[in-house]
Amino acid sequence: MSDREERAAKTRKRITIWGGILTLLLALLITAAMAGLPKYKIYTQTMRGQADFREAEINRQILVEEAKAEEEALQLRANGEAKRERIKADATEYAIQKVGAGLQANPKYLQLLWINEVAGSDGERIYIPTEAGLPILEAGR
């Protein structure tokens, strides 16, 4: 055999060996992928499930916090309204006491209040004097 033929034979032998090694590696890679793909799929589904669960948990916490904040706001509004009503009631009580004190000091105070009320109206009331000099406070319509 000539030197050239020997080199050609060695080259074919190397190509055959490397081809076999590459084929074997490719076969191993395909086998590993086929074995690992289902496990990877299960892993990704597990991770996705955990992420969805955590997201749902956070959303629930947000809803709970929003409900608490809304409850607090309603409570503050109710407290504010109650405080306003108490102030209004105190003012009404004070006004009634003042009118009562005015009536005790001067019985004609009620007539003065009525005259002021009639004077402040835009002609919506008609004053008809009575025998006692007191106005008729209610009339049938």
Image (cartoon, rainbow, N blue to C red):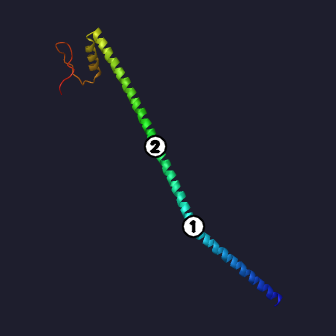
Does label 2 or label 1 sit earlier along the sequence?
1
Please, what is the three-letter code of the amino acid marked with disc 2? Answer: Val
Asked if 23 appears above or below 60 in the picture, the reply is below
Quick check: 14 left or right of 92?
right
Work out which residue is located at the far bottom of the displayed protein and give it. Answer: 1
Nearest the camera: 92 or 130? 92
Work out which residue is located at the far right of the displayed protein and give it. Answer: 3
Asked if 10 appears above or below 68 in the picture, the reply is below
Residue 98's quadrant in the figure? Answer: top left
Disc 2 residue crowd, few under 14, some 14–19, many 20+, Cα 10 Å: few
Q: Which residue is mark 2?
A: 64
Disc 1 residue crowd, few under 14, some 14–19, many 20+, Cα 10 Å: few
Question: Which residue is drawn at the image coordinates 75% and 80% (left, top)?
Answer: 14
Q: Which residue is mark 1?
A: 37
Residue 112 is situated, as x and y percent measured from the top left of the image, at 27, 14
Question: Which residue is drawn at the image coordinates 44% and 41% (left, top)?
Answer: 67
Residue 26 is situated, as x and y percent measured from the top left of the image, at 65, 74
Question: Which residue is drawn at the image coordinates 50% and 54% (left, top)?
Answer: 52
Question: Which residue is drawn at the image coordinates 35% and 23% (left, top)?
Answer: 89
Quick check: 36 left or right of 52?
right
Q: Secondary structure at mark 1?
A: helix
Residue 77 is situated, as x and y percent measured from the top left of the image, at 41, 33
Residue 11 is situated, as x and y percent measured from the top left of the image, at 76, 82
